[in-house]
Amino acid sequence: MTELPDVDELTLEQRVRLLSGGDFWHTRPVPEHGVPAVTLTDGPHGIRAQSATSERFDLSHNEPATCFPTAVTLASSWDEELVEEVGRALGTEARALGVAVALGPGMNIKRHPLGGRNFEYLSEDPLVSGRMAAAMVRGIQSRGVGACLKHFAVNNQESHRFVVDAVVDERTLRELYLAGFEHALTARPWAVMAAYNRLNGLHCTDNPRLLSMVLRGQWGFDGLVVSDWGAVEDRAAAVRAGTDLEMPGTAGDSDREVLAAVRSGRLEREHVTDSARRVLELVGRAPRDGSGGFPVERHHALARRAAAEGTVLLTNDGTLPLSRQRTVALIGAFAESPRYQGNGSSLVTPTQLDTALEELRGRGVNPHYARGYEPGDSERNPTLVAEAVEAARRADVAVVLAGLPGAYETEGVDRQDLGLPAQHDDLINAVCAANPRTVVALSNGAPVAMPWVDRPAAILECYLGGQAGGAALVDVLHGDVEPAGRLAESLPVAVSDVAANPFFPGRPHQVEHREGLFVGYRHHTTSGVRPLFPFGHGLGYTTFEWGAATVDRQRLGAEESVTVSLEVTNTGDRGGSEVVQVYVHDRTGVVLRPRRELRGFAKVRLDPGRSTTVEVELGPRAFAYYDVERAEWTVPRGTFDIEVARSSADVVHTLPVELTEGVSTSPEPPTTPPVATDDAAFRQRLGGPVPTPRAVLPFTRESTVAEISSTALGGLFARVLRRATPVGEDALGEGAVTGTLDRVLSEMPLRGLARLSGGRLRGEVVDLLVDALNGRRVSTGVRVLRTAAEAVGGRIVGGIPFRRETRGISRDTH
Ligand code: BGC
């Protein structure tokens, strides 16, 4: 902690200076008052401290740090203690690397399995997301550095992420998309990041309702709100709404905007002062002692344990754990080039990287190894498959490592379909045909289709296991540790089984959440559409017996809690863990509800033969819905079933309880169709008209590069921009598919380019461009366009680790 001046000691200009960054990763100092700059950097599963100049966005030159399993894997552990421990390690590393705020955890709800950043998010369920995020925050902050919840809010897709307006009804917003954030605030994070997208018409950064009314007013958040990088549309509006810090720096552009707004009376000084105070408070809390070291081996060991804890055993005929007497064929290039994290801002440069092949060899097992496929290549390769079949025939057991190549999971781009590359499916089918004792181990950050699901002897969903994932897989295969995960998301058979699918990802400027609450298991359990594997599912290596369950009271008032208890016994011959999940089924008939909703859970670890009593408390929120007319959480009166379950599809005990107080009517009765397919139903749910998406014409600062490309001038701009954008280095050697970079650029709004340009492209120049694009002042337009495109190209995407094959790029994609 450093003694810093009171905000009142700063001039208006100095206060304004605090409200935007100095470059990509630092706040701005006020040396006259001894206020230093502090560092904020990603992220969610490892610290990415950029070692090259922070003038540029560069993901490929970072200080090495432990790459822990990504959020999807950590959440699958359902283990808050473990996640907190990982948080502590992240905090230690942040501190060692001179980072004041780690930009994580990411906790958007997985609305759709194709969401491009699902690997970075925790769950489809707000309780799991909220509890895991809170644990992560507690861990990080225990080391005296800050955590930052992101991306607030409803940033559930990558397509059009800079401009899309998420249209969501208030009840769904409160119960599904905000509830996790609300819970995570119990851990008092230093910061919250306002998302890129709009929410019901307004950009999240410029949204007073979201930031001032809900986050600060209703939830009491007293920390800092930082914009997502380049998200701000109108800096003065954003300050008024409560976005304290704009990132990255704009070389004084936003100072000018804010000062002009204060001077013209458009923005009250108090807003500037409040935000400056919050920036000062954060700077004051930041440590000043980057120590330069952290326990590399200890953190690696933790990453290894966490990977196994988050691995989900989907099926097993008893082949796992492998007997050490058996000969093994290890198949799949991921065994030597592991798939262990996703692409984008969360990319970490690991301190070391374990591979399954090395780990097995290190244990003296000499597997028959066959590559099976090329890791970065999606083409079918019959020769490699034939070699794999040969290896599988010669061994007692075959282990196939398959999954999604890195290019499939990249920030900025949603996936196109659920499928694995065809060659992975071919390989699994061929190896299963050659050897009935085939184990499939999947590496991917989000659900994949498994047309071969009944063929393998066992399937392990390893997700993205971080830098020690390869060794953790061998631990699990041999049974040194148990795969202790449970799915924190539903795995659908096909995307057509997802209620949000017809509305995802929507149109460039609008995505309608017509499925309301019916996301993931809330949809599967209500509609009866069966998933491939249900939310909460996961097997282990031992067996458990669940005794009778009881509740401490059967009748409760609106403000009362109830505790569910049951005895769990490990009846197998080895240690293991079990996750007791408690769902609530509303039978009151008062309000439309998903068939069951998770309201509590507990993970227990037991030695063989041991028993324990598991207690799960359900508070009043467990029974409440958000009543839009009353604008408050409300409990219906009547009967609820408490369902004690192994998964969302496997209920072991049902315990009825009676809510003796509460309402008996609601604005959304149970007869309401769950999915508001037609406009009338959606209008009803929204409580007003369905908004019309923003028109493409006339062009504005909000127009995207793709949109302006329909004009000759805009096309020229896009071409020069692409040409001026250097090819990023490919940190992982796996890059993204040709065209990914084009997509990211195409979806950028003009004002986003300006905000990310570090002052090279000024707002006024964008306005000139817009005029020219709209057919005014065309002659100046050409010159301005060219200069502008060249100015921003190098800075914005210079370091994004996408391999761009220059020859493969069409110069005329529009
Ligand atoms: C991402 C954030 C990230 C930021 C800084 C943005 O593009 O959405 O999650 O923290 O960049 O890297």
Image (tube, rainbow, N blue to C red):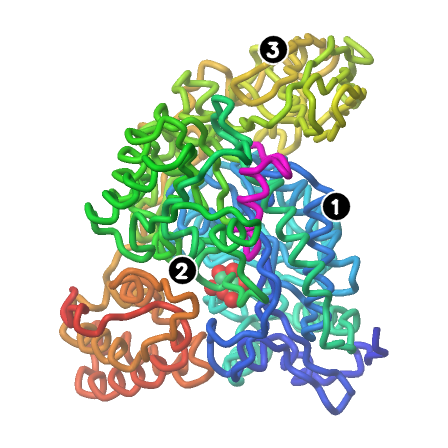
Badge 1 amino acid: Thr
Residue 464: x and y in percent read 50, 49
Q: Which residues are magenta?
A: 466-486
Circle 1 residues within 10 Å: few <14, some 14–19, many ≥20: some
Mark carried by residue 769: none
Neighbour tally class for label 2: few under 14, some 14-19, many 20 plus, Cα within 10 Å: many
Classify mark 1: helix, strand or loop: helix
Q: Residue at x 69, y 14 (%)?
A: 545
Mark 1, ligand 1, within 8 Å: the answer is no
Q: Who is closer to the viewer here, 579 or 452?
A: 452
Query: Dot 2 corresponds to which residue?
Result: 162
**Residue 441 within the segment the image draws in magenta:** no
Label 3 Cα crowd, 10 Å radius (few <14 / some 14-19 / many 20+)? some
Q: Does residue 138 lie above or below 241 as drawn?
A: above
Residue 550: image quadrant is top right
Q: Secondary structure at mark 2?
A: loop
Name the amino acid, label 3: Thr
Taking 514 as reference, is 124 left or right? right
Identify the disc placed on residue 588: 3
Label 3 vs label 1, nearer the camera: 1
Q: Which residue is mark 1?
A: 186
In which quadrant is the C terminus drawn?
bottom left
Image location (x, y in percent) of residue 753:
38, 73
Task: Compute the Cα span from label 2 to label 3.
Answer: 42 Å
The reply to whether residue 174 is in sight is no
Q: Is 470 within the magenta?
A: yes
- What's the CA distance linking mark 2 and mark 1? 29 Å
* Residue 650 falls in image quadrant: top right
Residue at 36% across / 47% down in the picture?
Answer: 332
